[in-house]
Amino acid sequence: MSSIYGEALRVSIFGQSHAPAIGVTIDGLPAGFSIDMEALAAFLRRRAPGRNPYSTPRKEDDLPEFLCGLVDNTTCGAPLTAIIRNTNTRSGDYAALRDVPRPAHADYAAQIKYGGFQDVAGGGHFSARLTAPLCIAGGICLQILEQQGIRVLAHIASVGEVEDTPFDPVNPVLPAGNPDFPVLDEAAGQAMQAVIALVRSEADSVGGTVECAVTGLPAGLGDPIFDGMENRLARILFGIPACKGLEFGSGFAGSRLRGSQNNDGFRMENGQVKTATNRHGGILGGITSGMPLLFRAAFKPTPSIGRAQQSVSLSQRAETELRIQGRHDPCIVPRAVPCVEAAAAIAVTDALLCAKKDHIFWEESR
């Protein structure tokens, strides 16, 4: 079931970009947790479209409607279902895409898989619009984790060739600033926004990377082989449209080092085992080490651009030129940041629930 994630915490995403609504069902939330609805709304606004010059002009309030699973904003043990109504759609902009697929988009692959019956409006269920319900689930999990002293921090690591200062791997800190465009170096952030403005003026797009850290995690979460923390995170992170790469700790750069350079020596700190450095990114053998969990996710440029592109007419079996209509982000990276945080929070919450038989973890926290 490709739209369902999790083991102890089951998250099911449903809907299409231009359907009447999109939504999520979450099964396995601990009963008795009170959701801060204002904090959740603020988190969802960071992902919502049409709020700044570097996102799509499509405007949606993205206010969740909770259908079940809550009593007085408190989880009651029943599966929680929430929807977001789509109110600002222009489906006619996409009519031609059933015959002429967009380069680098799912149009052609979906045409083959679903025999031409797929919903092309707004990208259907392949659209990044489906990250809104992901952020509902993730926003709730972020609040649950904060109650346990676990924080999820993410920033824009790069846009195009402009790079932000990376996190300190041992003590990652995200300074207060613009939550819609989180960076550690404000000058780098301004340069990134200039790049986005340039590609938008040229009817083009640009990609980038998001760096994420999870602090306060206990050692011992995750499992070896196929259920390691890297595996759990990779499965949900690659569910974010346009995510094309993922690395943990020193990542690909570590492959160019010697063991004597890449290994993290152990030491004692206040009676606890820690490492002096954190090139392993907080995961050893698929299991958390107690150091900050650190990873980077790469996002490709938005496929839908205003420039003429080469494609084919599937009905005519002939090459043709495509000029895409519709409203699209010149760079999805700023709005991907809360999606990465949400995905990480869901994966970590599921791992915690799996590790605590009969939800004893939650009983201890009350």
Image (tube, rainbow, N blue to C red):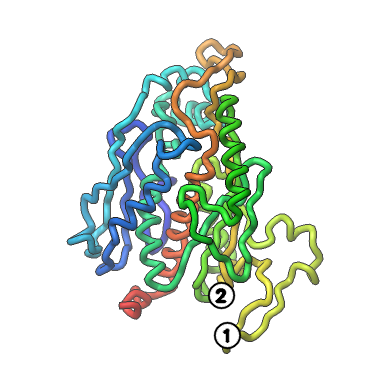
- Looking at the rendered structure, the secondary structure element under dot 1 is strand
Q: Residue at x 48, y 51 (%)?
A: 178
Q: Name the residue under label 2.
A: 290
Q: Mark 1 points at which residue?
A: 272
1 and 2 marks in contact (CB < 8 Å)? yes
Q: Residue at x 36, y 24 (%)?
A: 90
For the residue marked with disc 1, what is the amino acid?
Gln
Question: Can you name the residue that lies furthest to the left here?
Answer: 72
Query: Residue 116: x and y, percent?
Result: 44, 24
Q: Is residue 340 left or right of residue 295?
A: left
Of pointers 1 and 2, the one earlier in the residue sequence: 1
Quadrant into which the C terminus falls:
bottom left
| Above/below status of 205 relative to 30 | above
Q: Is residue 1 visible?
A: no
Q: Which residue is drawn at 55% across and 17% down?
A: 322
| Above/below status of 117 relative to 223 | above
Question: Can you name the residue that lies furthest to the bottom here?
Answer: 271
Residue 211 is marked as: none
